[in-house]
Every structure is written in structure tokens, then in C-alpha cells.
Image (cartoon, helix red, strand yellow):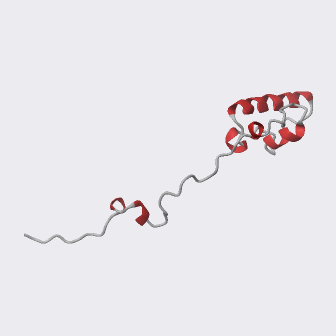
Amino acid sequence: MEERQEREPRMGDMDRDDRKGRGGDRGPRFKKKTCRFCENKDLIMDYKRVDVLVKLVSNKGKILPRRLTGTCARHQRLVAKAIKKARNAGFMPFSV
């Protein structure tokens, strides 16, 4: 019988650490943001507090999502209501 030649290992045969450009299990890529309103109970959500609401709106006037601001679901709902109320009251512009 013929003797088998050794073949080079393919990508599927290599361990995860042997792959080029990867350093194994690195863990999470980013730190989970925490809700600023849950952390600081003194920070009150109100439609008259435009200085707080401006940080939660993009430069085009859109309400930023939770994944960007880090607010929890409960406070994100309150943020949206406060921004809409501030827009109707004339404290904030609807758009740029």
C-alpha cells in the first residue's frame, strides 16, 4: 500500500488561537452603559430641564436610542415623553 502524504492543516482543523489575526477569547468588545437616571436619583426628568434633554437628542433633532444613550427602558420612555412635551411647549426645536 501507498503511504499517505501529510497534508497542510486547513482553517477548520486549526485551533482558535492558531488562526491568524485572532487572539483567542477576548471577552466583551465594549462596556455596558448604565442608566444615568438610575445612578443619580437627584437628576430629575422634566420637560423644562432642556440642558438634560439636549444630551439625549441628535444634532438633527431625533431622539437617540437606548443603545447609544445607555438609559434603561423605563427612563427611555420618560425621556421620549419629556422631549415631545418640550417640543410642543416650545423649549426645544422639532428639527434643525
Quarter of the image that includes the C terminus: top right
Relative height, residue 22 to residue 65 (above, below): below
Residue located at (82% from left, 30% from top): 82
Q: Is residue 57 visible?
A: no
Residue 4 screen position, x and y as percent: 16, 70
Is residue 72 at least partly visible in the picture?
Answer: yes
The residue drawn where x is 81% and y is 40% is 61
Residue drawn 91% across and 28% down? 89
In the picture, residue 56 is in which quadrant? top right
Give the percent coordinates (x, y) of residue 32.
64, 46
* Relative horizontal placement of residue 17, taking residue 47 as reference (left or right): left
In the displayed structure image, the side of residue 36 where residue 10 appears, left or right: left
Does 11 appear above or below 59? below
Residue 59, image x and y in percent? 81, 45
Q: Position of residue 38 (x, y in %)?
A: 74, 36
Q: Quadrant of residue 68?
A: top right
